[in-house]
Amino acid sequence: MTYELGVIGGMGPLATNVFYQYLIDHTVAHSDQDHINTILLSHASMPDRTASILSGNTEALLRAMQSDFALLNPLGLKAIAIPCNTSHYFYDTLTSFTDTPIINMVEETIRTCAAQGEKKVAVLATEGTLRSGVYAQYADRYGITCTDIAEDDAAKVMDIIYAVKRENRRDFPALLEMIDRYSRSARVILACTELSCIPIGKRNAVDALKVLGTEAIRKCRGDVKL
């Protein structure tokens, strides 16, 4: 068998499931054989990304991720996707672990916003993602401003993210209220894959997980069913 896409997932498992479902739903396919040959690693015991960034103790996390790349490297994949925004703080280091192209979830999301003419974004994410400034760095390259998130809102987002991880919950009116409020002045980015598990209806938000899924399909097959 020839695999096309490798997924380093499990961060968390529900979000990885949502990502894989997105691939199934948006691949142009008329039979089983038309879908993307995917090898999915659900590395649920991966050290917490936010805790690693905030503590500065990143060695265990990077060692665990490197072991996953070692499993994927012999497979001749077209691309690797990592459905975890916070882990992209380490993107440059991760590229040293493999010769396979790693889809840059953060840059692709910012590129999508730029292509839609956005000049200001509001990033809802983990404390690790916000503190690292990874979205702001890419936004600056594309002439986009990241508006600040209020501290109490950032804390609420963290509570929501860990409630999804802990309880598999998907109903959070507080998140919907935040999206509505911040989208009055900026394009909201759902920049944590746990947030991607929560139905938001037709709100003015860009979902980084969906951007990643779309780019994964394009790299493996070209056409995307939107």
Image (cartoon, helix red, strand yellow):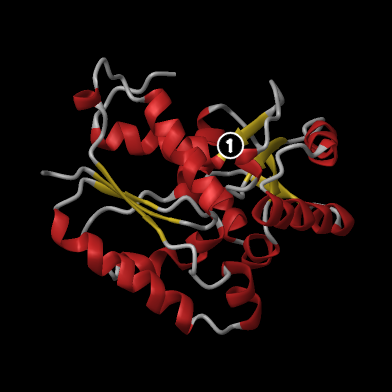
Q: Position of residue 138 (x, y in %)?
A: 53, 52
Q: What residue is rendered at 28% in x and 70% in y?
A: 97
Q: Position of residue 113 (x, y in %)?
A: 56, 35
Looking at the rendered image, the quarter that the C terminus falls into is top left
Looking at the rendered image, the quarter that the N terminus falls into is top left
Residue 111 visible within the image: no
Name, please, the residue furthest toward the right: 152
Lateral position of residue 4 relative to residue 204, left or right: left
Name, please, the residue furthest toward the front: 167
Depicted 143 relative to depicted 63: above or below? above
Question: Where does label 1 land, which residue?
Answer: 207
Circle 1 crowding by C-alpha within 10 Å: few under 14, some 14–19, many from 20: some
Residue nearest the viewer, comparing 32 with 219: 32
Residue nearest the viewer, comparing 125 with 69: 69
Q: What residue is rendered at 23% in x and 39% in y?
A: 37
Depicted 192 relative to depicted 118: above or below? below
Name, please, the residue furthest toward the top: 30
Residue nearest the viewer, comparing 60 with 113: 60
Q: Amino acid at mark 1?
A: Asp
Residue nearest the viewer, comparing 173 with 208: 173
Q: Position of residue 25 (x, y in %)?
A: 42, 24
- Quarter occupied by residue 21: top left
